[in-house]
Image: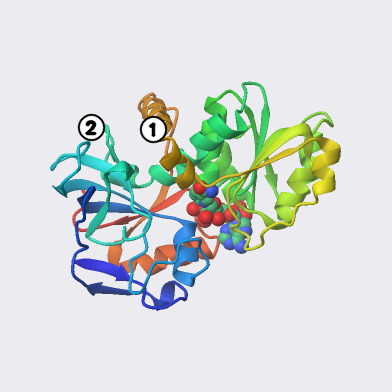
Amino acid sequence: MRAVICEKWGGPGDLKVADVAPPVLVEGCVRIRVMAAGVNFADTLMIAGHYQLKPPFPFSPGLEVAGEVTECAPGVTRARVGDRVLAFTGHGGFAQEAVTAEANVYPLPDAMDFVAAAAFPVVYFTSHFGLANLVRLNPGETLLVLGAAGGVGLAAVEIAKHLGATVIACAGGPEKLAVARDHGADHVVDYRNENIREQAKALTGGAGVDAVFDPVGGDAFTAALRGTRPGGRILIVGFASGTIPQIPANILLVKNVTVIGYSLGGHRKRDPELADRSLGELYDWWSEGALKPLISRTVALENAAEALQALAGRKSTGKIVLTVGDTP
Ligand SMILES: NC(=O)c1ccc[n+]([C@@H]2O[C@H](COP(=O)([O-])OP(=O)(O)OC[C@H]3O[C@@H](n4cnc5c(N)ncnc54)[C@H](OP(=O)(O)O)[C@@H]3O)[C@@H](O)[C@H]2O)c1
């Protein structure tokens, strides 16, 4: 099969696309003919050796796919050959075939095509699960979203709006702000030249925001913390800026602010029934037209490096999806 291969830690330019043996199917797993694969910032971290998961070389990156189940190992009860699915793969998604535990595989609605499905799992699951179950965002509250035109940030904008919140979207540059507005943001802040703390206060009558969704970290985190109201919550989603914030605990104490560390994978495994309900709700919202996944580009598997460069270089909005073979 064709696959993107990482043989050493490095950048997108160090990847190869090659013919390799398909992955081995082991108990409790399903084999998926990959039709499309979502590209994530985490892929850029994984190939650089900066991600929490460091697979042995050689490996294929790729956290999420959509495709068709072609084989089920003994012990599989939920999936069947022929099912159209989306799946979390951990790694190995940038390939014509992927193998993953059946607990990572979810059926697709008939109306959802493979490209849209490949853009769905990581960003919508993360944002929905985090905002609904951890932040417990209430209607009428104000959420400040950092990196709001990126994959997970834009999904958070849409989900927060659907939960009835007012959304302040922070992103770099007018094009990205326009994308956030198109997806429902009430207010936008260009954090290249506007002060996040001042804007958070100004847009909330001086009170500060109720909650923050932060996939960026670095200075943006610190500014957002200072723009959070007493009693507010901050969801730590990622560090796309490359800087892990050192949190001034005195501010948390004085302001009674709660910082919530969040990794989707752990929660999904701990509470699969809640994850099923979360996806069911997301599918309902998607079919009602409330969620509009932005796939800003599709790129052929052979050109995966180009897609990863765009994310690493801050040049992407919404999701980039790799198409594999003749994706319908
Ligand atoms: N906790 C979880 O379970 C979970 C799940 C999904 C993703 N994540 C994490 O969330 C982060 C974002 O992932 P994503 O796939 O949504 O990425 P993405 O689509 O590339 O979006 C990241 C955004 O971060 C901003 N950014 C700020 N500084 C940056 C820099 N130096 N380089 C690149 N981008 C920068 C960019 O927006 P501006 O240019 O507007 O600043 C960009 O739109 C990653 O750290 C990822 O690992 C975590």
Cα distance, mark 2 to mark 1? 15 Å
**Residue drawn at 52 percent across, 26 percent down:** 162
Q: Nearer the viewer, mark 2 or mark 1?
A: 1
Mark 2 Cβ inside 8 Å of ligand 1 = no
Whether residue 317 appears in this view of the structure is no
Q: Is residue 165 left or right of residue 85?
A: right
- Disc 1 is placed on an element classified as helix
Mark 1 Cβ inside 8 Å of ligand 1 = no
Q: Height in image: 313 above or below 77?
A: below
> Neighbour class for label 2 at 10 Å: few (<14), some, many (≥20)?
few
Residue 62 location, x and y as percent? Answer: 36, 59
**Residue drawn at 27 percent across, 44 percent down:** 102
* Kind of residue sitting beneath label 1: Leu
Q: Quadrant of residue 256?
A: top right
Q: Which mark is residue 279?
A: 1
Residue 240 location, x and y as percent? Answer: 59, 58
**Residue drawn at 39 percent across, 32 percent down:** 279
Residue 301 location, x and y as percent? Answer: 29, 63
Q: Which residue is mark 2?
A: 110
Residue 189 location, x and y as percent? Answer: 70, 44
